[in-house]
């Protein structure tokens, strides 16, 4: 699987706030927010459930990654999705850095990806 996931019984806004708080405790800030529901409505006049993409970044990890692989910025920030399911539950998912980094042909990023994955798994577990 290419992502880490937790299904919650929180409301959409509660789940969004909880993952933001949990990531902040781990040194991640949210650089971008994309409201897919609003975008699909305004650009295509299509209705979808609540769906946000959060671009999370930990500057220390980003710096380490850039030191190892200059073009790694293509893979940053770590994307987090908050998606309202039809049954009212909310999925919070985060890209699995280990899986994502397998496309980079540089063994130096492997330990970094493992470490980031552990931190993200812990952040997800705390919501």
Image (spheres, grey):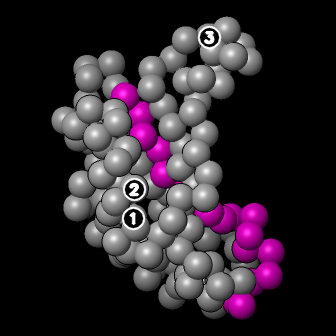
Instruction: Give the Cα separation between the discs numbered 1 and 3.
Output: 31 Å
Question: Is residue 113 shown left or right of residue 70?
Answer: left
Whole-angstrom CA distance, mark 2 to mark 3, is 27 Å
Which residue is at a point 55% across and 11% down the rendered structure image? 47
Q: Are marks 2 and 3 in contact (CB under 8 Å)?
A: no
Earlier along the polypeptide chain: callout 2 or callout 3?
Answer: 2
Give x and y (percent) for residue 96: 48, 62
- In the rendered image, which quarter is residue 24 located in? bottom left
Residue 46, numbered label: 3
Task: Report the span colored magenta.
Answer: 67-84
Q: Is residue 1 visible?
A: no
Using the image, determine if residue 3 lies above or below residue 91: below
Q: Is residue 48 above or below residue 98?
A: above
| Circle 3: element type | loop
Q: Which of the two discs, 1 and 3, sits closer to the camera?
A: 1
Residue at horizontal 61 percent and vertical 71 percent from the top: 101
Element type at marker 2?
helix
Q: Nearer the viewer, residue 53 or 3?
A: 53
Picture quarter containing residue 34? top right
């Amino acid at each position: 699987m290419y992502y880490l996931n937790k299904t919650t019984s929180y409301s959409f806004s509660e789940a969004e706030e909880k993952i933001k708080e949990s990531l902040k405790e781990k040194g991640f800030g949210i650089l971008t927010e994309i409201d897919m529901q609003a975008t699909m409505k305004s650009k295509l006049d299509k209705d979808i459930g609540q769906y946000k993409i959060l671009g999370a970044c930990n500057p220390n990890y980003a710096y380490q990654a850039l030191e190892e692989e200059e073009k790694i910025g293509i893979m940053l920030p770590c994307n987090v999705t908050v998606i309202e399911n039809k049954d009212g539950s909310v999925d919070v998912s985060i890209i699995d850095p280990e899986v994502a980094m397998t496309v980079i042909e540089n063994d130096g990023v492997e330990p970094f990806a493992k470490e980031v994955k552990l931190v993200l798994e812990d952040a997800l577990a705390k919501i």
